[in-house]
Each structure stands twice: as C-alpha cells, then as structure tokens.
Image: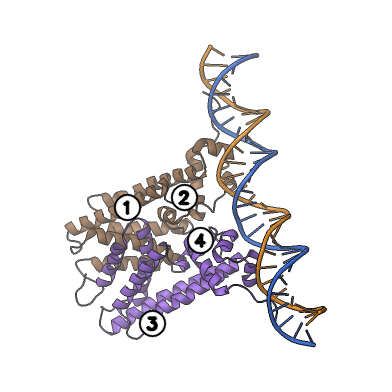
Chain colours: A brown, B purple, C orange, D blue
DNA sequence: CCAGTTGTTGACCATTCGGTCAAGAACAAT
DNA sequence: ATTGTTCTTGACCGAATGGTCAACAACTGG
C-alpha cells in the first residue's frame, strides 16, 4: 500500500550468505553488504534489522538448504552410500564455494555474539546433522550393511570427520584425497569386508 | 648498552598467543594486547614489528610447543595408543584453553592475510602433524598392531577427525563423548578385533 | 658527569566500523 | 491531485581500529 521495495530480499539474503560464509561475521562490513547486494544500508536495516539479524537470517537460509541435503539421509533406504554421497557433494560444493567449510560450524567458532540465540540455533543445526548421520547408520545396520555398534557415536565421528575434511582441504590436501580418506572411514565399518 | 626492556618478550608472546588462539587475528585489538601483556604499544611494535608479525611469532611459539607434543608420535615405539593419548591430551588442553581448536587450523581459516607467508607456514605445520600421524601408523603397522593399509590416507583421516573433534565439542558434545568417538576410529583399525 | 642509545609513555593520526537521521521518491487509497 | 505510508539515498555520528610521532626515562661507555 506504499512504495514497493526495489530489491528481492531473498536474493539479497543469498548474496549476504555468500559473503558471511566466505569471510565470517566480523569479516563482512556493512559496506561490503551494500556492494554485494546492491541494496542501500537503510533498506537492509529496514528489511532485516541489523547486521547480526541479517546474519541470523542468512544462517536460516543456509539451514533450509542443508535440510534438503539431509533429506536422503532421513529416507528409509539411507545407508553408507548415502553418507558417502553426502560427503562428496559437500566437498564439491565447498570447493566451488571457496572451500569455506560448514557455515553452522563456522558460526559456532565465530566471536560474533557469545552465547546468543544464534549460537543455540547453530548448535541445534549441528545436532540435526548428527541425527541425520545416526539415522542413516541405523538404517544401514538394520539392513546388515554394517556391523552393529553405537550409531550415535559413529555419527559423531562422521560429523567430526566430515567437518575435518574442510580443514584437510585448507591444509593443501586435494578434494579427491580428502574424499578418499572419508571413504576409508565408511569402508572400515562395512560388514562384508572389515577394515 | 642502553636502557634495558622492562618486560619479558617471550612472556608477552605467550599472553598474545592465548588471545589470538581464543579470538583469532581480527578479534584481538592492539589495546587488548597492551592490556593482556602489560606492555605498551610502541614497545610491542619495537619488539615484534606489527600486529601480523606478532601473530606470526605467536604461531611460531605454538608450533614449537606442538613439536614437543608430536615427539612421541615420531618415536620408534609409537602406535595406536600414542595416537589415542595425543587426541586425549589435545582435547583436555583445548578444554582448558576455551575449546579453541588448533591454532594452525584456525590460521588456515583466518582472513588475516590472503595467501601470505603465514598461511604457507600454517600449511607446513599441518603437514607436519599429518606426517607424525602417518609415522605412528606406519610403526603400528610394522608391529602388526593394525592391518596394512595406506598410512598417509589414514593419517589424513586422523587429522580430519582430530580437528573435527573441536567442532564436535563446540556443538555441545562432551569431552568424554568426543574422545570416545575418536577411539572408535582407532579401534576400527586394530588388527586383533576389527570394527 | 656527560653523551649516545634504546625503551617507555601517551597523545595523536587517518580510516573504518555499525548504526542513525532526515530529506526525497514512489506507490495506493481517497 | 492530495494524503499517507513505505522505500531509498546519502550524509552523518561516536567509537574503535592499526599504526605513528615526539617527548621523556633509563641505562652504558667514555
């Protein structure tokens, strides 16, 4: 009923997400956001609140995308291959995305706000990923694809390994090599041929 | 032959290291460093150069300490237990140290300076840790402690897992639980009882 | 005692930060 | 066309940033 906004908020959010993902909360200035989104500062504030709220919205968008990535792991036919594919896709995506690792984990490290609502939401998102891993592992166990064991513990290890792959990449290891080392983990659990 | 400095440079370096470790390069201001070290700004600049050089010196100090931690892994009797102990000690130390993860990996993520000498040195340090892991694994294989396999690949996975443990801790997993999941990895390689 | 050298102190610099303010522009309803 | 509401633009704010400058203090060699 008044002047319509000239930009697409979701598009601006996507571009902001890219920036935050690549450079972290403190590494992105309001001027950077203006430039990347093509949206004036005041408009960003009107639409999102402040810098931290914008980051929170970007993280939410990221989580929504992650949820789509997680869907196969929550499916009934999930198994080790699903996990392997998840890791591969994550590595490829991060390769394209300046190898920035998982934004949720990056948020957990960030000194943006100590123990705010944001950190809690990031922690919840991480828990969700671990739950997806655990679900896939349980299904695989139920199918006899891998020997019985503590699925939650294994899921935690998968989470650590997957996120560690990003560090591995940063330290100079190739994408193929990083993926191979993760497959080593999954293969060591395969029931048919151990180790 | 002139006025002697009133502070211990290594002590100042140690305190700076703590700060950088906990908050990252950009998260520490010169005023923070003055306060933490009790040393005036000009004295810091005279002794170290500038902020980035101070960070580099702190990282070097960190690497020297790491080298001491790595020594058992390079020993002749190194094995899976040595690896397990390394992971446990690392977790405990990080627990005391505000759970900040490995400074080398943090440096690799930091947007302090793109592709500077610092990044190269951090990458070299990471390679050194992976080499230590590989050495311990090779010794263990030679002793028949675990089945034969690609030690370098396994070392990379260990590196990823160990560094992922920090992310796991951040996401709310207990120290004991994180350690247990890492032991799961080592145990899956033990030759006696697989999985 | 007196130079000469080095360390310390605190004020100071330009720049950038996140955030705000006020004026104008674009629309819907009347 | 006028009014009311929202969006946009650009100037502006105080605070904090990394870094520098100049005066002063402490020591050594003559």
Q: Is residue A13 above or below residue B44?
A: above
Q: Are discs 3 and 1 less than 8 Å apart at CB? A: no
Nearer the observer: mark 4 or 1; the answer is: 4
Using the image, tell me which numbered label, if any, was put on residue B24: 4
The residue labelled by disc 1 is: A127
Q: Are marks 4 and 3 on the same chain?
A: yes
Within 10 Å of disc 4 (Cα), the crowding (few <14, some 14-19, many 20+) is many
Image quadrant in which you'd find residue A176: bottom left
* Label 1 CA crowd tier, 10 Å (few <14, some 14–19, many 20+): some
In the image, residue B29 above or below residue A64: below
Which x, y percent locates residue A73?
28, 52
* Left/right of residue B94 with respect to residue A78 in the rendered view: right
Tell me the chain of label 1: A
Q: Nearer the viewer, mark 4 or mark 3?
A: 4
Chain for numbered disc 3: B
Q: Secondary structure at mark 4?
A: loop
| Mark found first going from the N terminus, 4 or 3 | 4
Of tags 2 and 3, which is closer to the observer? 2
Q: Is residue B1 left or right of residue A173?
A: right
What's the CA distance linking mark 1 and mark 2?
Answer: 20 Å
Of the pair B26 and B107, the residue shown nearer to us: B26
Q: CA distance from mark 2 to mark 4?
A: 14 Å
Viewer-closest of B97 and A93: B97
Tell me the number on the disc at residue B74.
3
Q: Is residue D2 left or right of residue A64?
A: right
């Amino acid at each position: 009923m008044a002047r319509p906004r000239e930009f697409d908020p979701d598009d601006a959010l996507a571009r902001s997400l890219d920036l935050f993902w690549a450079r972290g909360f403190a590494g992105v200035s309001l001027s950077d956001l203006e430039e990347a989104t093509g949206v004036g500062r005041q408009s960003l504030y009107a639409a999102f609140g402040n810098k931290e709220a914008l980051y929170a919205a970007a993280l939410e968008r990221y989580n929504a995308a992650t949820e789509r990535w997680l869907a196969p792991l929550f499916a009934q036919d999930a198994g080790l291959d699903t996990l392997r594919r998840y890791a591969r896709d994550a590595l490829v995506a991060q390769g394209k995305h300046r190898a920035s690792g998982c934004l949720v984990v990056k948020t957990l490290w960030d000194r943006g706000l100590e123990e705010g609502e944001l950190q809690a939401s990031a922690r919840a998102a991480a828990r969700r990923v671990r739950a997806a891993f655990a679900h896939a592992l349980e299904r695989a166990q139920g199918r006899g694809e891998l020997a019985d064991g503590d699925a939650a513990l294994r899921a935690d290890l998968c989470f650590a390994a997957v996120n560690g792959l990003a560090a591995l990449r940063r330290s100079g290891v190739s994408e193929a090599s990083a993926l191979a080392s993760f497959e080593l983990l999954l293969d060591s659990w395969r029931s048919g041929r151990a180790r």
